[in-house]
Image (cartoon, rainbow, N blue to C red):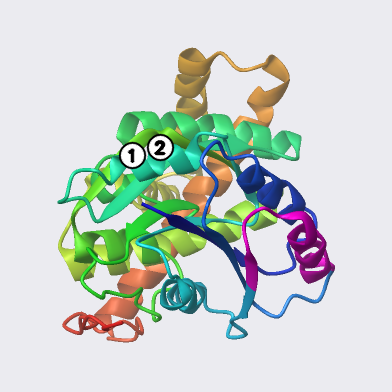
Amino acid sequence: MDLTVVILTYNSARTIAACLSSVARQTRPPAEILVVDDDSTDETLALVRRFAVDSAAPVRVLRNGRRNISRGRNIGIAATRTPLLAFLDSDAYAEPEWVAALTTAFEPPQVAIVGGEVLAAHATRFAAAVAISDGAVRDLAASGTILFTTCNLALHTERVGGHRFDERWVYAEDVEYVHRVGGAVIAPAARVWHESRATVRGYLRQMYQYGLWKVRYTVRTREVRLVDYSATAALVLSAAAGVLVSPWLLLAYPGLCAAETAAVVLLRRPRPALIPMMFVGWLVKNTGWGLGVLVAIAQEAVGRSGVPAADRPAPVAG
């Protein structure tokens, strides 16, 4: 079966060349490459055009322009002319057997969606520390739909039943889509490297959004994992104990982050120089995620999440 690679971009000049080069090096070349651009203002499109000149696979550029990642994915689905398509983020790069492994995973007729392995690349020392901790969490705690991410996700266009991504979901659109469509499997041999957030600010924003959309996902699907709410519980209980009992109890929260750091250190044996940054990463992760969960719970309580609980997007034909 032929496969189309769909790459979403926005001001991706720093990483798009490596991403495209990894697609060009596939042992099983894609039939086409679709670049869905969200009105980039840097050199992204110039680099894409330069790549297209010598590319063995045809390259088409499509416009999103809405700052909506789910819409960009739907544009890619609608433009695909092959039975299979694979999403690859513009800040990720695929190993040479990626397309071949994805294609093989679709051989059973019941498979509609294939997720691949995501490995952490990093551009800063903070990103390297975050990658170690996040990798450990993924290995130990992740299961089910949480394993699927659109930086490495493939669809069989005829088996997904015409379903599109829900454009109200700007985060967690991948797990919501997989849960709704079903027929999903993981192909560990389909490996891509994806950059961790390089700065504290960027990681805090990412974790806040993940916490926010995790609650919305739980409300829609009724899938509850208590571990996803542990950071929020620690944040609230530590603050309450510090105010009501003793200010010293405020230290319980950073103490939890230190314990999480120590557990990952014992498990992964990182370079000692990264350990302080790992502790900072846990503080940022727990705080961002915890605050996101609290805000989402408040929004759900007053019905202002923006994604009505009973409203399910219908399949779109074509």
Q: Is residue 291 visible?
A: no
Residue 55 in magenta stretch: yes
Q: Nearer the viewer, residue 203 or 9?
A: 9
Q: Nearer the viewer, residue 253 or 140?
A: 140
Q: Looking at the image, how many numbered discs can be counted on the residues?
A: 2
Residue under the point 41% across and 71% down: 295
Residue 121 in magenta stretch: no
> Label 1 crowding class (10 Å Cα cut-off): few <14, some 14-19, many 20+?
few
301 horizontally vs 18: left or right: left
Residue under the point 31% across and 70% down: 297
Indicate the secondary structure of the residue bearing disc 1: helix
Q: Are marks 1 and 2 in contact (CB under 8 Å)?
A: yes
Residue under the point 28% across and 46% down: 106
Which region of the structure is painted magenta? 43-60
In three-dimensional space, the C-alpha distance between marks 1 and 2, rounded to whole angstroms, equals 5 Å
Q: Which residue is mark 2?
A: 101
Indicate the secondary structure of the residue bearing disc 2: helix
Q: Is residue 95 visible?
A: yes
Q: Which residue is mark 1?
A: 104
Q: Give, as a three-letter code, the residue at label 2.
A: Ala
Q: Quadrant of the C terminus?
A: bottom left
